[in-house]
Amino acid sequence: MLDPEVPDERRDQIADETRTRIESGGTLKHDTSWGMRKLAYEIRQRTEADYRLFRFEGEGGVLDDLNHSLRIADGVLRFRVFKVDPTSPAIVPPPALGTSSGGQRPPRRQEAPAQQPQAAPEEGPSAPAAAAPEPAESAAEEAAAEESAESGSGPPE
């Protein structure tokens, strides 16, 4: 993830240097620019980053070299190296926010309606004990719980 406030030329230079380091000690399998994406949380007071993905095969020396160079490079907000199964498909980027939904949040998942309690079985020595259904929260309580979860303000834990 590259700093969006760094000039485009510098971000491209970082990507080229990374590509060269990978190819010097391994095999580059896939190189993709995901473009600017919104971050889940701020990193160094940035709310978005330029995402780049490199898929490669190599030995530990390549990983050590990448780890060192990306750690000290100006313009790199965050990087991660993952070990993946070589037979797994290449990762396709998720759609950027605002491209398909006009910048709006996706609709909330609809919950299934509460099940109606079943009639109690006949009582007697051969009838199994029926478990009492748990009471469902009222719609107002559920809405209040969702609002407090979204705003981050809720009862202290």
Image (tube, helix red, strand yellow):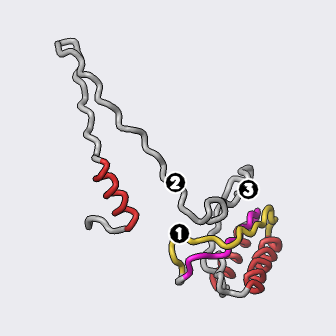
Amino acid, disc 1? Ala
Q: In front of the other: label 3 or label 2?
A: 2
Quadrant for residue 29, please give it: bottom right
Quadrant for residue 99, please give it: bottom right
The relative height of residue 20 versus residue 55 in the rendered view (above or below) is below
Residue 148 in the image, given as x and y percentages of width and height: 34, 63
Tell me the magenta residue range. Answer: 46-58
Q: In front of the other: label 2 or label 1?
A: 2
| Front residue (pair 25, 101) | 101
Q: Give the number of the disc on residue 40.
A: 1
Q: Would residue 24 be found to the left or right of residue 145 on screen? A: right
Q: Which residue is mark 2?
A: 107
For the residue labelled by badge 1, is the local secondary structure a helix, a strand or a loop? strand
Q: Give the number of the disc on residue 94.
A: none
Q: Which residue is mark 3?
A: 90
Badge 1 density bin: few <14, some 14–19, many ≥20, Cα 10 Å: few
Residue 15 in the image, given as x and y percentages of width and height: 76, 77
Badge 2 density bin: few <14, some 14–19, many ≥20, Cα 10 Å: few
Q: In front of the other: label 3 or label 1?
A: 1
Mark-to-mark CA distance, 3 and 2: 28 Å
Mark-to-mark CA distance, 2 and 1: 18 Å
Amino acid, disc 2? Pro
The relative height of residue 111 versus residue 10 in the rendered view (above or below) is above
- Which residue is drawn at the image coordinates 76% and 64% (left, top)? 56
Tell me if residue 54 is in the magenta stretch: yes
Farthest residue in the front direction?
A: 102
Residue 127 in the image, given as x and y percentages of width and height: 23, 15
